[in-house]
Image (cartoon, rainbow, N blue to C red):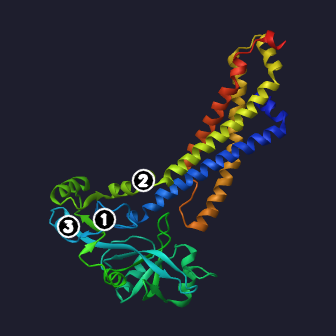
Amino acid sequence: MNAPLGWTQLRHRPLRLLVALAGIGFAVLLIMMQLGFRAALFDSAVRIHERLEYDIALFSPDSVFIVRPQTFSIRRLYQALGDVEVADVTPVHIFPAVYKNPWTGQRRSINTLGFDTNGAWLNTPGIDAVQPLLTRQDAVAIDLSSRPEFAPPDRTLAEALAESGTLTTEVNDREIDIVGGFRMGTSFGIDGSLVTSVENWLRLFPDRGREDIQLGLLKLAPGADADVTRDRLREALPKDVLVMTRADFIARETAYWNSATPIGYIFAFGAIMGLLVGAIIVYQILFADVSEHLPEYGTLRAIGYSSSFVSGIVLQQAGILAVLGFVPGIAAAAWLYGKAAAATSLPLVVTPERAGLVFAMTLGMCAFSAWLAVRRVRRLDPADVF
Protein backbone atom coordinates (compact mmCIF):
# COMPACT_ATOMS: atom_id res chain seq x y z
CA MET A 1 0.00 0.00 0.00
CA ASN A 2 1.37 3.40 -0.97
CA ALA A 3 1.92 5.97 1.77
CA PRO A 4 -0.40 9.00 1.76
CA LEU A 5 0.93 11.81 -0.43
CA GLY A 6 0.85 14.25 2.49
CA TRP A 7 3.03 11.96 4.64
CA THR A 8 5.45 11.40 1.75
CA GLN A 9 5.96 15.13 1.41
CA LEU A 10 6.43 15.61 5.15
CA ARG A 11 9.05 12.91 5.54
CA HIS A 12 10.92 14.20 2.49
CA ARG A 13 12.23 16.94 4.76
CA PRO A 14 12.92 15.12 8.07
CA LEU A 15 14.49 18.13 9.82
CA ARG A 16 11.51 20.33 8.98
CA LEU A 17 9.20 17.56 10.16
CA LEU A 18 11.01 17.28 13.49
CA VAL A 19 10.84 21.05 13.98
CA ALA A 20 7.10 20.98 13.28
CA LEU A 21 6.51 18.10 15.69
CA ALA A 22 8.59 19.80 18.37
CA GLY A 23 6.59 23.00 17.95
CA ILE A 24 3.25 21.22 18.10
CA GLY A 25 4.40 19.12 21.04
CA PHE A 26 5.45 22.25 22.90
CA ALA A 27 2.08 23.87 22.18
CA VAL A 28 0.27 20.75 23.45
CA LEU A 29 2.46 20.74 26.56
CA LEU A 30 1.78 24.44 27.22
CA ILE A 31 -1.98 24.03 26.78
CA MET A 32 -2.07 20.90 28.96
CA MET A 33 -0.10 22.57 31.76
CA GLN A 34 -2.27 25.68 31.75
CA LEU A 35 -5.52 23.71 31.68
CA GLY A 36 -4.15 21.30 34.29
CA PHE A 37 -3.22 24.07 36.71
CA ARG A 38 -6.57 25.76 36.09
CA ALA A 39 -8.45 22.54 36.87
CA ALA A 40 -6.22 21.94 39.91
CA LEU A 41 -7.05 25.44 41.11
CA PHE A 42 -10.79 24.74 41.05
CA ASP A 43 -10.57 21.14 42.31
CA SER A 44 -8.30 22.01 45.24
CA ALA A 45 -10.27 25.13 46.17
CA VAL A 46 -13.35 23.06 47.00
CA ARG A 47 -11.68 20.21 48.87
CA ILE A 48 -13.07 21.37 52.20
CA HIS A 49 -16.54 21.83 50.70
CA GLU A 50 -16.49 18.27 49.36
CA ARG A 51 -15.01 16.59 52.46
CA LEU A 52 -17.48 18.08 54.93
CA GLU A 53 -20.71 16.09 55.42
CA TYR A 54 -23.77 18.27 54.88
CA ASP A 55 -26.76 18.90 52.64
CA ILE A 56 -27.07 22.65 53.20
CA ALA A 57 -24.48 25.18 54.38
CA LEU A 58 -24.91 28.54 56.11
CA PHE A 59 -22.22 31.08 55.28
CA SER A 60 -21.73 34.79 55.78
CA PRO A 61 -22.47 36.92 52.69
CA ASP A 62 -19.48 39.07 53.69
CA SER A 63 -17.11 36.11 53.25
CA VAL A 64 -15.10 36.22 50.04
CA PHE A 65 -13.94 32.61 50.15
CA ILE A 66 -13.63 29.86 52.71
CA VAL A 67 -10.01 30.41 53.77
CA ARG A 68 -10.80 33.72 55.50
CA PRO A 69 -14.50 33.61 56.30
CA GLN A 70 -16.47 36.22 58.21
CA THR A 71 -18.56 35.30 61.23
CA PHE A 72 -22.29 35.13 61.78
CA SER A 73 -24.42 34.26 64.78
CA ILE A 74 -24.81 30.62 65.79
CA ARG A 75 -28.47 31.44 66.39
CA ARG A 76 -29.07 31.18 62.63
CA LEU A 77 -28.02 27.56 62.84
CA TYR A 78 -30.55 26.74 65.54
CA GLN A 79 -33.23 28.74 63.77
CA ALA A 80 -32.63 26.49 60.74
CA LEU A 81 -33.02 23.44 62.98
CA GLY A 82 -36.63 24.46 63.41
CA ASP A 83 -37.38 23.53 59.79
CA VAL A 84 -39.29 20.26 59.50
CA GLU A 85 -36.77 18.78 57.03
CA VAL A 86 -33.59 19.65 58.97
CA ALA A 87 -32.44 16.63 60.97
CA ASP A 88 -29.16 17.87 62.47
CA VAL A 89 -26.92 20.93 62.53
CA THR A 90 -23.39 21.72 63.64
CA PRO A 91 -21.16 24.81 63.77
CA VAL A 92 -17.73 24.79 62.13
CA HIS A 93 -15.01 27.26 63.06
CA ILE A 94 -12.46 28.06 60.35
CA PHE A 95 -9.56 30.49 60.33
CA PRO A 96 -5.80 30.52 59.61
CA ALA A 97 -3.47 30.11 62.58
CA VAL A 98 0.29 30.49 62.92
CA TYR A 99 2.03 27.09 63.03
CA LYS A 100 5.56 26.67 64.38
CA ASN A 101 7.53 23.94 62.64
CA PRO A 102 8.89 21.92 65.59
CA TRP A 103 12.01 20.91 63.66
CA THR A 104 13.06 24.18 62.02
CA GLY A 105 11.35 26.78 64.20
CA GLN A 106 9.89 28.52 61.16
CA ARG A 107 6.35 29.85 61.43
CA ARG A 108 3.75 29.58 58.68
CA SER A 109 0.05 30.18 58.27
CA ILE A 110 -2.02 27.00 58.48
CA ASN A 111 -5.77 26.62 58.00
CA THR A 112 -7.43 25.45 61.22
CA LEU A 113 -10.86 23.84 61.53
CA GLY A 114 -12.80 23.24 64.73
CA PHE A 115 -15.80 20.92 64.44
CA ASP A 116 -18.01 18.59 66.47
CA THR A 117 -15.84 15.53 67.05
CA ASN A 118 -18.81 13.53 68.36
CA GLY A 119 -20.51 13.47 64.96
CA ALA A 120 -19.69 12.40 61.42
CA TRP A 121 -19.19 15.84 59.88
CA LEU A 122 -15.85 15.35 58.14
CA ASN A 123 -15.23 12.59 55.60
CA THR A 124 -11.59 12.38 54.61
CA PRO A 125 -9.00 9.56 54.78
CA GLY A 126 -7.60 9.00 58.29
CA ILE A 127 -10.05 11.21 60.19
CA ASP A 128 -12.05 8.34 61.72
CA ALA A 129 -9.00 6.97 63.53
CA VAL A 130 -7.84 10.31 64.92
CA GLN A 131 -11.19 11.97 65.66
CA PRO A 132 -11.68 10.40 69.14
CA LEU A 133 -8.26 11.75 70.20
CA LEU A 134 -9.23 15.34 69.42
CA THR A 135 -11.37 15.59 72.55
CA ARG A 136 -8.18 15.85 74.61
CA GLN A 137 -7.18 19.34 75.60
CA ASP A 138 -4.84 21.00 73.08
CA ALA A 139 -4.90 17.98 70.75
CA VAL A 140 -4.97 18.52 66.99
CA ALA A 141 -4.59 16.43 63.85
CA ILE A 142 -2.54 17.63 60.89
CA ASP A 143 -3.08 17.12 57.19
CA LEU A 144 -0.33 14.73 56.13
CA SER A 145 -0.62 16.11 52.59
CA SER A 146 0.40 19.59 53.74
CA ARG A 147 3.33 21.27 52.03
CA PRO A 148 6.84 20.14 53.06
CA GLU A 149 7.41 23.39 54.98
CA PHE A 150 5.31 21.93 57.81
CA ALA A 151 7.42 18.76 58.03
CA PRO A 152 10.99 17.97 59.08
CA PRO A 153 13.62 18.65 56.39
CA ASP A 154 14.63 15.01 56.02
CA ARG A 155 11.32 13.13 56.08
CA THR A 156 7.57 13.48 55.67
CA LEU A 157 4.99 14.34 58.29
CA ALA A 158 3.62 10.81 58.10
CA GLU A 159 7.07 9.35 58.81
CA ALA A 160 7.67 11.78 61.69
CA LEU A 161 4.33 10.93 63.32
CA ALA A 162 4.92 7.22 62.85
CA GLU A 163 8.25 7.52 64.66
CA SER A 164 7.13 9.62 67.62
CA GLY A 165 3.39 8.95 67.89
CA THR A 166 2.73 12.48 69.15
CA LEU A 167 4.44 15.74 68.22
CA THR A 168 4.50 18.83 70.40
CA THR A 169 4.68 22.29 68.84
CA GLU A 170 3.03 25.71 68.99
CA VAL A 171 0.00 27.10 67.20
CA ASN A 172 -0.81 30.77 67.78
CA ASP A 173 1.88 30.69 70.50
CA ARG A 174 -0.01 27.98 72.39
CA GLU A 175 1.58 24.61 73.02
CA ILE A 176 -0.39 21.83 71.33
CA ASP A 177 0.00 18.10 70.66
CA ILE A 178 -0.29 16.71 67.15
CA VAL A 179 -1.88 13.34 67.94
CA GLY A 180 -2.42 12.05 64.42
CA GLY A 181 -2.93 12.83 60.79
CA PHE A 182 -5.45 12.73 57.99
CA ARG A 183 -5.36 13.35 54.23
CA MET A 184 -7.05 16.29 52.54
CA GLY A 185 -4.51 18.19 50.44
CA THR A 186 -3.45 21.73 49.66
CA SER A 187 -4.87 24.39 47.38
CA PHE A 188 -3.77 27.75 45.99
CA GLY A 189 -5.05 29.35 49.20
CA ILE A 190 -4.19 26.62 51.73
CA ASP A 191 -0.67 25.26 52.31
CA GLY A 192 -1.69 22.98 55.19
CA SER A 193 -4.55 22.21 57.57
CA LEU A 194 -5.20 21.33 61.19
CA VAL A 195 -8.47 19.94 62.58
CA THR A 196 -9.51 19.81 66.20
CA SER A 197 -12.53 20.04 68.46
CA VAL A 198 -14.51 23.25 68.87
CA GLU A 199 -13.22 23.63 72.43
CA ASN A 200 -9.59 23.33 71.35
CA TRP A 201 -10.14 25.68 68.44
CA LEU A 202 -11.51 28.33 70.80
CA ARG A 203 -8.42 27.91 72.97
CA LEU A 204 -6.28 28.68 69.93
CA PHE A 205 -8.39 31.76 69.16
CA PRO A 206 -9.24 33.19 72.61
CA ASP A 207 -10.50 36.45 71.11
CA ARG A 208 -13.28 34.63 69.26
CA GLY A 209 -16.52 33.64 70.92
CA ARG A 210 -18.46 30.41 70.73
CA GLU A 211 -21.55 32.30 69.53
CA ASP A 212 -19.79 33.57 66.39
CA ILE A 213 -19.20 30.88 63.77
CA GLN A 214 -17.77 30.85 60.26
CA LEU A 215 -19.78 27.99 58.79
CA GLY A 216 -22.95 26.12 59.67
CA LEU A 217 -23.72 22.64 58.35
CA LEU A 218 -27.18 21.13 58.05
CA LYS A 219 -28.14 17.52 57.42
CA LEU A 220 -31.63 16.89 56.09
CA ALA A 221 -34.05 14.12 56.81
CA PRO A 222 -33.92 11.14 54.41
CA GLY A 223 -35.79 11.91 51.21
CA ALA A 224 -35.86 15.67 51.76
CA ASP A 225 -35.36 17.90 48.72
CA ALA A 226 -32.30 20.07 49.35
CA ASP A 227 -33.30 22.74 46.83
CA VAL A 228 -36.81 23.11 48.24
CA THR A 229 -35.51 23.24 51.81
CA ARG A 230 -32.86 25.78 50.82
CA ASP A 231 -35.47 28.07 49.29
CA ARG A 232 -37.69 27.77 52.36
CA LEU A 233 -34.79 28.58 54.70
CA ARG A 234 -33.83 31.58 52.59
CA GLU A 235 -37.28 32.98 53.19
CA ALA A 236 -37.27 32.17 56.90
CA LEU A 237 -33.76 33.28 57.92
CA PRO A 238 -32.45 36.86 58.04
CA LYS A 239 -30.33 38.05 55.13
CA ASP A 240 -27.14 38.05 57.20
CA VAL A 241 -26.50 34.44 56.14
CA LEU A 242 -26.27 32.69 52.80
CA VAL A 243 -28.20 29.43 52.51
CA MET A 244 -26.59 27.10 49.97
CA THR A 245 -26.76 23.50 48.90
CA ARG A 246 -23.49 21.64 48.42
CA ALA A 247 -23.59 22.43 44.69
CA ASP A 248 -24.27 26.12 45.41
CA PHE A 249 -21.39 26.32 47.88
CA ILE A 250 -18.92 24.70 45.47
CA ALA A 251 -20.10 26.90 42.59
CA ARG A 252 -19.64 30.05 44.72
CA GLU A 253 -16.07 29.13 45.64
CA THR A 254 -15.22 28.20 42.05
CA ALA A 255 -16.68 31.46 40.76
CA TYR A 256 -14.49 33.42 43.17
CA TRP A 257 -11.27 31.84 41.90
CA ASN A 258 -12.42 32.01 38.28
CA SER A 259 -13.65 35.59 38.10
CA ALA A 260 -12.75 37.54 41.25
CA THR A 261 -9.05 36.65 41.10
CA PRO A 262 -6.69 36.90 38.10
CA ILE A 263 -5.48 33.31 38.51
CA GLY A 264 -8.24 31.63 36.52
CA TYR A 265 -7.90 34.24 33.77
CA ILE A 266 -4.12 33.84 33.63
CA PHE A 267 -4.33 30.07 33.14
CA ALA A 268 -7.01 30.43 30.45
CA PHE A 269 -4.94 33.11 28.72
CA GLY A 270 -1.88 30.86 28.83
CA ALA A 271 -3.79 28.06 27.12
CA ILE A 272 -4.91 30.44 24.37
CA MET A 273 -1.34 31.63 23.89
CA GLY A 274 -0.18 28.02 23.55
CA LEU A 275 -2.81 27.48 20.89
CA LEU A 276 -1.65 30.56 18.98
CA VAL A 277 2.01 29.55 19.22
CA GLY A 278 1.22 26.12 17.79
CA ALA A 279 -0.92 27.58 15.02
CA ILE A 280 1.87 29.94 13.95
CA ILE A 281 4.45 27.14 13.89
CA VAL A 282 2.21 24.82 11.86
CA TYR A 283 1.32 27.62 9.45
CA GLN A 284 4.98 28.44 8.82
CA ILE A 285 5.82 24.79 8.19
CA LEU A 286 2.88 24.22 5.87
CA PHE A 287 3.34 27.51 4.03
CA ALA A 288 7.01 26.68 3.40
CA ASP A 289 6.01 23.24 2.12
CA VAL A 290 3.32 24.68 -0.14
CA SER A 291 5.75 27.26 -1.57
CA GLU A 292 8.34 24.56 -2.22
CA HIS A 293 5.90 22.29 -4.05
CA LEU A 294 4.01 24.85 -6.10
CA PRO A 295 5.28 23.36 -9.41
CA GLU A 296 4.03 19.91 -8.40
CA TYR A 297 0.67 21.33 -7.33
CA GLY A 298 0.48 23.23 -10.62
CA THR A 299 1.13 20.02 -12.51
CA LEU A 300 -1.67 18.25 -10.65
CA ARG A 301 -4.02 21.10 -11.53
CA ALA A 302 -2.87 21.05 -15.16
CA ILE A 303 -3.61 17.34 -15.63
CA GLY A 304 -7.11 17.71 -14.27
CA TYR A 305 -7.03 17.39 -10.48
CA SER A 306 -9.35 19.80 -8.71
CA SER A 307 -8.34 22.52 -6.32
CA SER A 308 -10.08 20.58 -3.53
CA PHE A 309 -7.86 17.55 -4.16
CA VAL A 310 -4.69 19.61 -4.00
CA SER A 311 -5.93 21.43 -0.88
CA GLY A 312 -6.71 18.06 0.67
CA ILE A 313 -3.02 17.16 0.53
CA VAL A 314 -2.19 20.13 2.76
CA LEU A 315 -5.05 19.31 5.12
CA GLN A 316 -3.78 15.73 5.24
CA GLN A 317 -0.38 17.01 6.28
CA ALA A 318 -1.98 19.11 9.00
CA GLY A 319 -3.83 16.08 10.37
CA ILE A 320 -0.66 13.98 10.42
CA LEU A 321 1.26 16.74 12.19
CA ALA A 322 -1.52 17.08 14.77
CA VAL A 323 -1.50 13.39 15.64
CA LEU A 324 2.28 12.97 15.68
CA GLY A 325 2.87 16.20 17.61
CA PHE A 326 0.17 15.44 20.17
CA VAL A 327 1.78 12.19 21.36
CA PRO A 328 5.09 13.61 22.71
CA GLY A 329 3.26 16.67 24.05
CA ILE A 330 0.79 14.64 26.12
CA ALA A 331 3.58 12.34 27.32
CA ALA A 332 5.67 15.30 28.49
CA ALA A 333 2.60 16.82 30.20
CA ALA A 334 1.91 13.58 32.08
CA TRP A 335 5.50 13.49 33.33
CA LEU A 336 5.44 17.13 34.42
CA TYR A 337 2.02 16.63 36.07
CA GLY A 338 3.57 13.95 38.26
CA LYS A 339 6.50 16.17 39.23
CA ALA A 340 4.30 19.17 39.96
CA ALA A 341 1.79 17.12 41.94
CA ALA A 342 4.57 15.67 44.10
CA ALA A 343 5.99 19.14 44.77
CA THR A 344 2.70 20.97 45.44
CA SER A 345 0.19 18.26 46.48
CA LEU A 346 -2.21 19.71 43.90
CA PRO A 347 -4.54 17.30 42.05
CA LEU A 348 -2.72 17.23 38.71
CA VAL A 349 -3.62 14.24 36.54
CA VAL A 350 -4.16 13.73 32.82
CA THR A 351 -7.86 13.04 32.55
CA PRO A 352 -9.40 11.51 29.39
CA GLU A 353 -11.68 14.53 29.09
CA ARG A 354 -8.80 17.01 29.15
CA ALA A 355 -6.67 14.92 26.82
CA GLY A 356 -9.58 14.66 24.39
CA LEU A 357 -10.21 18.41 24.57
CA VAL A 358 -6.55 19.24 23.91
CA PHE A 359 -6.41 16.75 21.03
CA ALA A 360 -9.48 18.40 19.48
CA MET A 361 -7.85 21.80 19.99
CA THR A 362 -4.67 20.52 18.35
CA LEU A 363 -6.60 19.23 15.34
CA GLY A 364 -8.44 22.53 15.09
CA MET A 365 -5.20 24.48 15.42
CA CYS A 366 -3.54 22.50 12.63
CA ALA A 367 -6.65 22.62 10.43
CA PHE A 368 -6.85 26.41 10.79
CA SER A 369 -3.16 26.75 9.91
CA ALA A 370 -3.68 24.50 6.89
CA TRP A 371 -6.66 26.63 5.79
CA LEU A 372 -4.45 29.72 5.86
CA ALA A 373 -1.58 28.01 4.06
CA VAL A 374 -3.78 26.44 1.39
CA ARG A 375 -5.17 29.75 0.13
CA ARG A 376 -2.22 30.04 -2.20
CA VAL A 377 -3.06 26.64 -3.65
CA ARG A 378 -6.67 27.63 -4.25
CA ARG A 379 -5.58 30.68 -6.23
CA LEU A 380 -3.02 28.64 -8.16
CA ASP A 381 -3.09 28.96 -11.96
CA PRO A 382 -0.94 26.34 -13.73
CA ALA A 383 -0.03 28.94 -16.38
CA ASP A 384 1.52 31.15 -13.69
CA VAL A 385 3.66 28.30 -12.42
CA PHE A 386 5.03 27.32 -15.80
Q: Does residue 192 appear anywhere in the picture? A: yes
Q: Crowdedness of circle 2 by 10 Å Cα count: few (<14), some, many (20+)?
A: few
Question: Which disc, if any, is residue 260?
Answer: 2
Q: What residue is disc 3 on?
A: 76
Q: Secondary structure at mark 3?
A: helix
First along the sequence among labels 1 and 2: 1
- Taking the image as shown, residue 31 lies to the left or right of residue 119, namely right
Is residue 121 shown above or below 176?
above
Q: What residue is disc 1 on?
A: 54
In this rendered view, identify the residue nearer to me: 74 or 52.
Answer: 74
Q: Crowdedness of circle 1 by 10 Å Cα count: few (<14), some, many (20+)?
A: many
Q: Position of residue 67 (x, y in %)?
A: 40, 67
**Callout 1–callout 3 Cβ contact below 8 Å:** no
Residue type (three-letter) at the residue carrying disc 2 = Ala
Q: Secondary structure at mark 1?
A: loop
Q: Position of residue 222 (x, y in %)?
A: 24, 62
User: Residue 135, located in which quarter of the rendered image?
Assistant: bottom left
Select label 2 or label 3 by which is in front.
Answer: 2
Q: Secondary structure at mark 2?
A: helix
Q: Position of residue 345 (x, y in %)?
A: 55, 67
C-alpha separation, residue under disc 1 versus residue under disc 2: 26 Å
Is residue 374 shown above or below 177?
above
First along the sequence among labels 1 and 3: 1
Q: Does residue 353 appear anywhere in the picture? A: no
User: Residue 272, located in which quarter of the rendered image?
Assistant: top right
C-alpha separation, residue under disc 1 versus residue under disc 3: 16 Å
Residue type (three-letter) at the residue carrying disc 3 = Arg
The residue under the point 81% across, 24% down is 293
Residue type (three-letter) at the residue carrying disc 1 = Tyr
Is residue 146 shown above or below 169?
above
- Taking the image as shown, residue 239 lies to the left or right of residue 108, namely left
The residue under the point 16% across, 63% down is 83
